[in-house]
């Protein structure tokens, strides 16, 4: 996998999935009311920022192949980090505010969709996520690696013949 084509981007810290989508009750003139879920203006702005950064990094069109996603979520380093390190050198960053990895993942994949990848539903075959040690500004660093593997179904047909 080290020789597979990769795209690495350092992106802004993702907004929480709790602020990414919103719902409202729609009351049409006729028929029953229903719930409509939509992407918030804040989420649209995040997606636009990710798209701009990807394009400025040389991404011209979304990949159309299977991919692996690796990302590291870096929370913002607090001003009192040195005091925290002195108090607990090994686990000082446990108290640093950070969104959950799975919360960040959904927002990240949605922001990459249509920009770096076409569709996370069929393309993303592996995901590796970690929370980084706060070393400065909050951000998420993502690497998208193309997976040029044989279709597992191809061997089924050749063995049946």
Image (spheres, rainbow, N blue to C red):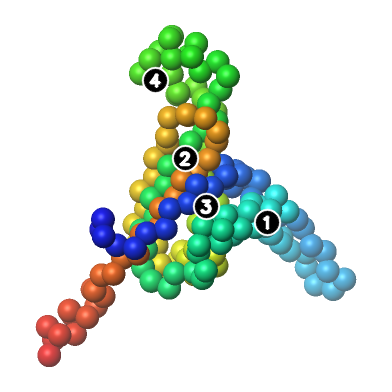
User: As displayed, is residue 81 above or below residue 73?
Assistant: above
Q: Looking at the image, do the residues carrying marks 3 and 2 touch, with CB atoms under 8 Å apart?
A: no
Neighbor class of circle 1 (other Cα within 10 Å; few <14, some 14-19, many 20+) is some
Query: What's the mark number on residue 108?
Result: 3
Structural distance between the alpha carbons of marks 4 and 2:
17 Å
Q: Is residue 105 in view from this perspective?
A: no
Query: What secondary structure is found at the residue carrying circle 2?
Result: strand
- State the mark number for residue 73: 2
C-alpha gap between disc 1 and disc 3: 12 Å
Asked if residue 29 is positioned above or below residue 145 in the image, the reply reads below
Tell me the crowding category of disc 2: few under 14, some 14 to 19, or many 20 or more residues within 10 angstroms, Cα based. Answer: many
- Work out which residue is located at the far bottom of the displayed protein and give it: 161
Real-space CA distance between mark 4 and mark 1, rounded to the nearest whole angstrom: 35 Å
Q: Secondary structure at mark 1?
A: helix
- Image x and y of residue 118, in percent: 49, 69
Question: Which badge, 3 or 2, comes first in the chain's sequence?
Answer: 2
**Contact check, label 4 and label 3, Cβ < 8 Å:** no
Q: Which residue is mark 4?
A: 91
Which residue is disc 1 drawn over?
A: 44
Mark positioned earlier in the residue sequence (2 or 1): 1
Q: Which mark is residue 56?
A: none
Task: Sort mark 3 into few (<14), some (14-19) or many (20+) by Cα contacts within 10 Å.
Answer: many
Tell me which label, 4 or 3, sits earlier in the chain.
4
Q: Earlier in the sequence, mark 1 or mark 3?
A: 1
Kindly identify the residue that appears in the image at 18 percent across and 80 percent down.
156
């Amino acid at each position: 996998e080290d020789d597979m084509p990769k795209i690495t981007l350092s992106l802004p810290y993702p907004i929480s999935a709790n602020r990414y989508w919103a719902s409202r009750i729609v009351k049409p003139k006729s028929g029953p009311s229903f719930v409509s879920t939509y992407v918030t203006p804040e989420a649209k702005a995040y997606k636009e920022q990710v798209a701009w950064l990807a394009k400025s990094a040389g991404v011209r069109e979304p990949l159309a192949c299977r991919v692996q996603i690796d990302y590291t979520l870096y929370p913002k380093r607090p001003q009192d980090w040195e005091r925290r390190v002195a108090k607990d050198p090994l686990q000082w960053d446990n108290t640093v505010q950070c969104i959950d990895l799975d919360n960040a993942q959904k927002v990240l994949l949605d922001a990459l969709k249509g920009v770096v990848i076409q569709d996370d539903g069929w393309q993303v075959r592996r995901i590796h996520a970690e929370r980084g040690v706060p070393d400065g500004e909050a951000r998420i660093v993502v690497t998208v690696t193309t997976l040029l593997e044989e279709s597992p179904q191809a061997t089924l047909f050749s063995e049946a013949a």
